[in-house]
Structures are given as structure tokens and as C-alpha cells.
Image (tube, helix red, strand yellow):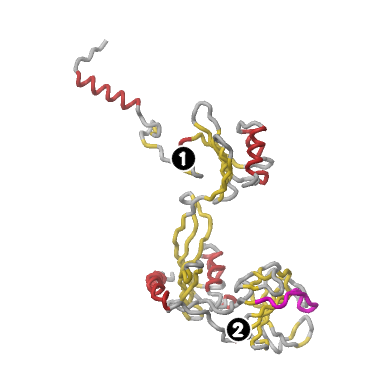
Amino acid sequence: MLLIKNPLIILLLLILISSCKSEDSSTDKKNKKPIPEVKAFGFRLNDFEVVRDTVEQGDTFGEIFLRNGFDYSTIYEIDKISRKKFNFRKIQINKPYTFLFSKDSISSPVAFIYQPSIIDYVVVNLKDSIWVEKNQKEVELRSFEAHGIITSSLSETLDQKKLNPLLAYDLSSIYAWSIDFFRLQKGDKFKILYTQKYVDDSVYVGLNRIHAAYFEHKNKPYYAIEFESDKERGITEFFDENGKNLRRAFLQSPVQFSRISSRYNLRRRISYYGRTKPHFGTDFAAPVGTPIRTTASGTVIASGYTRANGNYITVRHNGTYKTQYLHMKKRYVRKGQKVNQGDIIGTIGMTGYTSGPHVCYRFWKNGRQVDPFKQKLPEAKPISEKLKEAYMLKMQPIKEALDCIEFI
């Protein structure tokens, strides 16, 4: 037996033994490194036994709980309480779910989490009392920039650049009053600053929106910078480099991303009638069911059906202007209803005298039908002098950032 008499050595041994026994449970014993903290759904997952799985074909809410050790009476109580917040009878296959159990000897249930989407989740608290809460993961916005030169179409250019196709809709909305997106030309260019949404640090969940853009159409530059013009009502609009509002009194088109199949033409030969007859409208062809939006704010003065027009809607915008939308499949507004610019008022159809799915868009000025593309239409109100200084300060560095993006 070894006898240690030196008191200094005995003290060092006691310190060593003590430090070994008090090793932190959150330390990886093999590598002597701290185990990283993992948080999700409002819980510190390190504190629980975590059971993850996904809903499979034929799974029910009850069967999932039975497999994880719950009895029928508890399942019935959970189902009854949860219905007020979420109907678990409608769970879908391939959707993930998680059980959290305590790490003690009993391993009692603490929570059940179901994820109906990447962002949304539902928590069923199982400890002490049962309650249900719907929530969303924290979404992080990340900034990106992109550019492109159009060779055939905007959508094909975005596809070639491996960019989100929804950027085309954002661009068409921003420039809806100033650029005819049905007549883009080869060589037109764009630059954009936009944000995308992420959860769990790196999981992409979709496009947020474009915040600034530059579009060069027919060699003419169009800047668009986002700015909150009314903080009280939370209204955000786009202005150019001089503080001029890009919005106009009328949209260029009642349909996003369709094609003009026939223009306003007083000497057009109409195949349906087999003879020359004036065409007072502009036809926008698109698949049946495509949304139709009112091109300006106003009041619905007619919403009905005739043999020639099919389902149609007429909107009076003021004492000067009136628009009409023909051949709809469905009408969503009634006579006397107020509508705002861009509101969906119906869908593309083939009702009335028509040989294909489209909306015939008609435009009146001072009681006479005219070609809307040849009218000098009124502009929106300019930015107030009170806000213009703040806008110009914000705009300048953003414009410089757009200018620094090079077309490669």
C-alpha cells in the first residue's frame, strides 16, 4: 500500500478528484467540448428526450399518441381541448412532429409539436395541464442583389439566372403604371435589391419582396425605390430618383403576365363574326381562372351578363374615366360596390361571344371609347414636401448600390 505523506500532493489529488466528479453534464465527455445548446419551438431541447417522426400514410392523431405511450382517455382529452385552436384530425402525411419527454426516471411527456408548414407549428403542452398554442418560427430576412439582360422574356431570363420566378410578379407590380410588360424588348435590363426569408438559420422559406429596382426599357432608365409614404396607415410606395411616384391613376393592364391577343382597332376583321367590325377593346389572353384586377379605384356601376359580353363588370372611376371587363368566368363584385386599384374583381373566362379565354378591356374617356395605350393618363400625387427630404436621403445610397451592380 502506497502511503503519501506530502500534504501538497494530497491537496492536488483532492482537487483533481473533485474536478472529475463535478464535470458539467453539458460537456461532450469523449472530446471534452461543450455540447451546443439547441433551441426550437420555444424549448431548450438539450433538457429533454426528443422523439422526432413524420406522419405516414394511414396515421391518425390517436394512433400517433398510442404509439408513444398515451392511453385512450388522455388522447380523448387532448383532442377535445385542442379543437378550439387546431383540428389534429386533419394532419397531413409527410408533415413532421416531435414529442418532448422529461429526462428523469419516469420520462413523463412534456409537449407535442406538429408542423403543418415550414414556418408554422402547433404546441400541445402535456405537463401539469393541457393547452394548445399555434405559433410561427422566427423568420430571418437576408438581402440579395440580382441583375439580368432580357433575351426573350423576363421569366426565361430569371430562369436562366436561377432566380425566384416570383420576382417577375414583383417587378410587374412595381412598374405596372410605367412599363408595358407585354412588350419588353430584347436587350432590356434590370437590377434588383430584394430580401428572402429563412428559418432555422439556413432553411429557405420564400421570397420576401423587392425593395429597390432599376429597369432599362427601350434604352430609358426607370428607378424604383421603396419608401413608407404614410406611417400611420403603413402605406409603402415606390418613387424614382427624383421623388416622383411610380404609381399612376391607371394600371397598364387588368391581368398580370398575359399577352395582348388583340388591340383597339376600328377596322379589325373579327373572326367570330366573319367580317370587319370595330374592336373598341384590348384583349388580354390568359388561361381560364386567371385573376382580373380593376385598373383604377372607383365604383362598380354594372355587374351582370349579356349574350355578347358574357359576364362583365363596369367601373366608373370619376367624371372622366370608366372601364369595362368582358367575358369573365366569375364576377366577384356587385353593383354599387367600391373597389380599389388592383382589387381582384373576377376571373378570365370564355362567356359571351368569344373564341378563346381572355378579358376584353374597354376604356372610356368623357363618354367615348378610346385606346387606353394612347391616352396621357393622370399621375398619382407626388411625395409631400415634408417627406421628400427624408426620401432623398434614403434614396441616394440605394441608388448608388443599384448603380454599382454591373451587367455581366
Residue 75 vertical placement versus 331 (above, below): above
Above or below residue 131? Residue 318 is below
Residue at image position (68%, 82%) is 281
> Disc 2 to disc 1, how far (Cα)?
60 Å
Q: Is residue 307 magenta?
A: yes
Look at the image and say whether residue 97 sits in the magenta stretch.
no
| SS for callout 2 | helix
**What amino acid is found at the position of numbered circle 2 in the picture?**
Phe
Q: Residues within 10 Å of mark 2 (few under 14, many from 20)?
A: some
Q: Which residues are magenta?
A: 299-311
Assign the C terminus to one quadrant of the image: bottom left
Please tell me which residue is depicted at 21% across the width and 21% down the height of the picture: 9
The answer to whether residue 306 is seen in the rendering is yes
Q: Which mark is residue 74?
A: none
Q: Which residue is mark 1?
A: 44
> For the image shown, how many numbered marks are present on the structure?
2
Determine the residue positioned at 42% across, 71% down: 402
The answer to whether mark 2 and mark 1 are in CB contact below 8 A is: no
Residue found 63% across the figure and 38% down from its top: 78
Which one is in front, 406 or 195? 195
- The N terminus - image quarter: top left
- Give whichever of discs 2 and 1 has the lower sequence position: 1
Q: Main secondary structure of the magenta part?
A: strand
Residue 363, horizontal then vertical, whole percent: 66, 83
Q: Is residue 272 above or below residue 287?
A: below
Which of discs 2 and 1 lies nearer the camera? The answer is 1
Residue 122 percent across, percent down from the top left: 57, 45
Disc 2: which residue: 373
Q: Secondary structure at mark 1?
A: strand
Q: Quadrant of residue 110?
A: top right
- Taking the image as shown, residue 288 lies to the left or right of residue 31, namely right
